[in-house]
Amino acid sequence: MTIENISCNKSFGGWHKQYKHQSRVLDCEMRFAIYLPPQAAEKPVPVLYWLSGLTCTDENFMQKAGAQRMAAELGMAIVAPDTSPRGDGVPDDADKAYDLGLGAGFYLNATRAPWNRHYHMFDYVVDELPALIEAHFPVTGQRAISGHSMGGHGALVIGLSHPHRYSSISAFSPIANPMACPWGEKAFAAYLGENREHWRQYDACELLKLAVSEVPILIDQGDADTFLEQQLRPQQLVEIAGHKGYPLDFRLQPGYDHSYYFIASFIEQHLTFHSLYF
Amino acid sequence: MTIENISCNKSFGGWHKQYKHQSRVLDCEMRFAIYLPPQAAEKPVPVLYWLSGLTCTDENFMQKAGAQRMAAELGMAIVAPDTSPRGDGVPDDADKAYDLGLGAGFYLNATRAPWNRHYHMFDYVVDELPALIEAHFPVTGQRAISGHSMGGHGALVIGLSHPHRYSSISAFSPIANPMACPWGEKAFAAYLGENREHWRQYDACELLKLAVSEVPILIDQGDADTFLEQQLRPQQLVEIAGHKGYPLDFRLQPGYDHSYYFIASFIEQHLTFHSLYF
């Protein structure tokens, strides 16, 4: 488990760094970014894992969300992986569609060819990446998880299916019910096959129905988000949480859209939320 | 003077918007971005003009600097123009070099062909853009100016040569003495010709020597900036200010580089600085 540093920028007294490493789970070279707050020079700090949306890499969140200021204040590391396996040997969608293949791993373990050799982002985020981070950086075993859109789906699914590994979950504009939206149906059919029973493990609504532990969830959603009605569909998730009395705080933010301008506006509140449970 | 809105994102309770318009001064279609804080819905607000560095457009600062949070708190608009004229009819460097032509207007009025028809970013920033902003948006006549690298040069030169139009000036990693660095010598020779007497009006050091008014200046510079020694060269500017007793606060920030991670780390302090003089 070696990692190679490829960039380093001082940021709010701490450090933004990019690394590459050979991923065993994804069978390719991967890049990730980490923000280490100033406190990490003195003592181990907890980690927020951030999962980005369709088309993103490790860079979008680190460059656009403005999260480092609050992470530096709270003493929290942030780790941002890529959104799919990458490299010459990794298959992409035949039509280069933005919502399948490269940049669109959907944080699941693919079982269908040609995807099943490399597309195991679920195992990568749950196991390999935290093991790597905890072996190489001054971090505690405390973890939280968050993400945007496809990454909000990833954060919900990974957090809900591993309640003992994450102390809190949050999401911006998550694909909350992927089995019932075009993005999710297309990706799940390609990666997992047509049997919808195999899809349930990757649908936040299905997982919330079964949830026994109560890892707190915060979701922000803009009401001017053009993907809200057809693709994101948070209603069922909110209803299930209501029925169960699950601690899910869903906030519909008037006027906000699907962009990083929305994320930046509320990221401080998400970091503060996660810090309450470390 | 008509302008056409091309994007709109809610951000920290205010609005990030992009517009295009036909520029008379540049003789081409131009795009700019404006951040309007929530206060602008109630009353006119002062404006900080931000000038970006080489290769940038109106987008880099708005997406990466994280300035909107503090602008919303202070009630300050921010306007970010492009860094050169643009469009099919606008000449570029024959070698497509990043430091001449498109994306590299150096905030001057070119006098040499083929640049002299379109490359008038000095007049655009000083006159046409503020007139446009003040005609179309709820802003006061209070203006401040700031920028990064080539844009730091632009902010210093435009602010120092128009002390009655700007209440304060700031810069990150400015090209502080362009007559004495490779970037400046290349651009000035191309845009203005070989007679160095014609260059003085666009060199912050030369302007500071002649300055009578005392518009306060704040400069942040990272000491790990790889361009510091050869291209940025702030020493002479700091010395001239010292000799004259000019109110210039130069801060060498240990460990910081030339990136937007540096700008984001200190932008709050720059906005606060400008707000003191509105």
Image: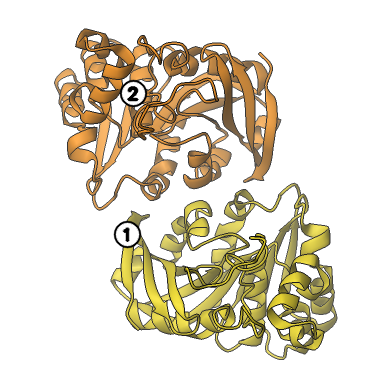
Chain colours: A yellow, B orange
Q: Is residue B65 visible?
A: yes
Compared to residue B246, the image places residue B38 above or below, namely below
Nearer the camera: disc 2 or disc 1 = 1
Marks 2 and 1 in Cβ contact (< 8 Å): no
Asked if residue A22 lies left or right of residue A270, the reply is: left
The image shows residue B32 at horizontal and vertical percentages of 57, 29
- The residue that appears at 71% across and 50% down in the rendered structure is A257
- Towards the viewer: A25 or A124: A25
- Towards the viewer: A183 or B147: A183
For disc 1, the marked residue is: A8
The image shows residue A141 at horizontal and vertical percentages of 44, 84
Element type where label 1 sits in the image:
strand
Q: Is residue B13 visible?
A: no
- The residue that appears at 26% across and 29% down in the rendered structure is B183
Mark 1 residue type: Cys
The image shows residue A181 at horizontal and vertical percentages of 81, 68
Mark 2 residue type: Leu
Q: CA distance from mark 2 to mark 1?
A: 29 Å
Asked if residue B201 lies left or right of residue A248, the reply is: left
Query: What's the mark number on residue A76?
Result: none
- Towards the viewer: B110 or B245: B110
Compared to residue A57, the image places residue B195 above or below, namely above
Q: Residues within 10 Å of mark 1 (few under 14, many from 20)?
A: some
For disc 2, the marked residue is: B156
The image shows residue A18 at horizontal and vertical percentages of 38, 64
Q: Chain of mark 2?
A: B
- The residue that appears at 54% across and 79% down in the rendered structure is A118
Q: Residues within 10 Å of mark 2 (few under 14, many from 20)?
A: many
